[in-house]
Image (cartoon, rainbow, N blue to C red):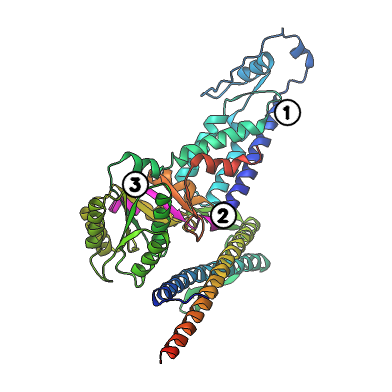
Amino acid sequence: MFGGLKEKLQAARNRLGTSIQGVVAKQEPPSPETRTAEPETPLPQQKTISSTAPTFVDKVKVLIIERELIVSEKDISEALAELEMTLLESDVALPVSDAIIAHVRTNLVGKHRKIGESVDALVVGALKSALLEVLGKGFNLVEYVKTHAHPVKILFTGVNGTGKTTTVAKIGAFLKKNGYTVVIGAGDTYRAGAIEQIGVHAERIGIKIIQHQEGADPSAVIFDAVQYAVSHKIDVVLADTAGRFHTKSNLMNQLEKIRRVMKPDLIVYVDEAVAGNDAIVRAAEFDRTVGADAVVLTKADMDSRGGAAISIAHTIGKPLMFLGTGQGYDDIMPFDPAQVVEDLLGSDT
Amino acid sequence: MQQMDQRELMTLQHYLKEYGQQAEIFVSQLEMLENGRMEAHAAIEALEGMLATEDGIVLLQIGGGASVRAKVLEPEKILLSIGAEVVVERSNKEAVEFLKERIMEMEASQKKVAETLDRLRSQMNEINKRLESGYQQSAATEQDQD
């Protein structure tokens, strides 16, 4: 997953490291006497981050007295420009790549680094905190279900052919595994075979499904699913809906009606990670029209760029909840930002 | 072998149909990737060809099968969409390198999609075999009853 991005980030990390390493060569004073003339000063234990650009005098003073180097903006500007290109080429949205660059810059410029201290750790630390900032906190569905009144009603929306129905089944299986009872409302009454498809999934994972005839009003199906959950004390209602493009106003109005009838606790937008920036644009549109509380990205195992996964939380301000990673019911991964950042940057640290 | 009932046969048919739908999606993804790859190859050929011409004149397709002769003013400066809806100016050589990298990425994705499709097809074959044997058993049972 996100292999291309991982490779590119690794290259960018090395490039940044080399830039900072270069600072050592430039700042090392030519005369050894200057250094030995200084009295033995105990090295300060804490590194400080200065928000203002260090002057030449500051740099020399810190180098001589504290045996530390200060990274300046000029030292890393080229490497940051390359990092920006790397992120954009990986389909990371422009505002997100700007935020990452700004964060890395703030983190590194003015940073005091002891001579001999690992440059890589400094760079990886800055990149990790920048990525964590844009990735947000993720969304813990189990915790949400645990802390909210039952039945928790979850409405799934999204465009056609992204794997929404399969995602509903996977999340159903996930919740069941975590000890919750689930009912699925087969609200995709439009696509031929969709009711059968979700029916087969529900049977396979052993979850009750509420379905009407093809062409029936999806609001009615989902209303019945909620009623069933209330009367049978079911923990979670998962409402599948037909895929639709945000540009089709009649279909978006239908979704709005479903929302009014169901009164969902969560609206989950489902799209495919491989759609890259398109997924972000569409998620923003859905959020504007019917709302979205969390996002699921499917087919993440086939996405080497990872742009959508990196950008979506920061761009639309809604957390990424799950990543779909394959065909099986277990092939769904709760999105854990720390884990993703570790996977992208952690292996060689 | 255990006798299959009608319900089990129907479930298998549903599985087969569902797998078929999934396979269709993957096939269309493969087509999209192949189109993208071919397009990138064509772009590389055009970029390299542009440098090779002395007068900088190229045939520009304007749709409907019509083309005009056009003079490329700056064949060394290429405006390239690099992703995230961002267009940057690159040199001809850099643009070719970028496109070659994209082709490699697309080929890797094609390989992954093709592997998934193969897995899906082998599962479909399995289901087909089970369905066939189920049909044969039903037919044999019906004959026995006659």
Chain of the residue where label 2 is placed in the rendered structure = A
Q: Nearer the viewer, residue A52 or A230?
A: A230
Q: Which residue is mark 2?
A: A304
Is A93 on the left-hand or right-hand side of A214?
Answer: right
Q: Is A122 within the magenta? A: no
Is A26 on the left-hand or right-hand side of B146?
Answer: right
Sequence-wise, which precedes: disc 2 or disc 1? 1
Mark 3: few/some/many CA within 10 Å (<14, 14-19, 20+): some
Residue B5 at what x, y percent from top left? Answer: 42, 76
Q: Which residue is mark 1?
A: A25
Chain of the residue where label 1 is placed in the rendered structure = A
When asked about the image quadrant of residue A43, the answer is: top right
Above or below, comparing residue B96 to residue B130 in the picture: above
C-alpha span from label 2 to label 1: 37 Å
Q: Residue at x 54, y 70 (%)?
A: B123
Which mark is nearer the camera, 3 or 1?
3
Q: Are marks 3 and 2 on the same chain?
A: yes
Q: Residue at x 55, y 37 (%)?
A: A128
Above or below, comparing residue A283 to residue A100 in the picture: below
> In the displayed image of the protein, which residue is found farthest to the right?
A32
Q: Residue at x 36, y 69 (%)?
A: A196
Circle 3: residue type: Asp
Secondary structure type for disc 1: helix
| Residue A20 seen by the camera | no
Circle 2: residue type: Ser
Residue A150 at what x, y percent from top left? Answer: 28, 45
Q: Which residue is mark 3?
A: A293
| Residue A17 seen by the camera | yes
> In the displayed image of the protein, which residue is found farthest to the bottom?
B146
Is A14 on the left-hand or right-hand side of A93?
Answer: right
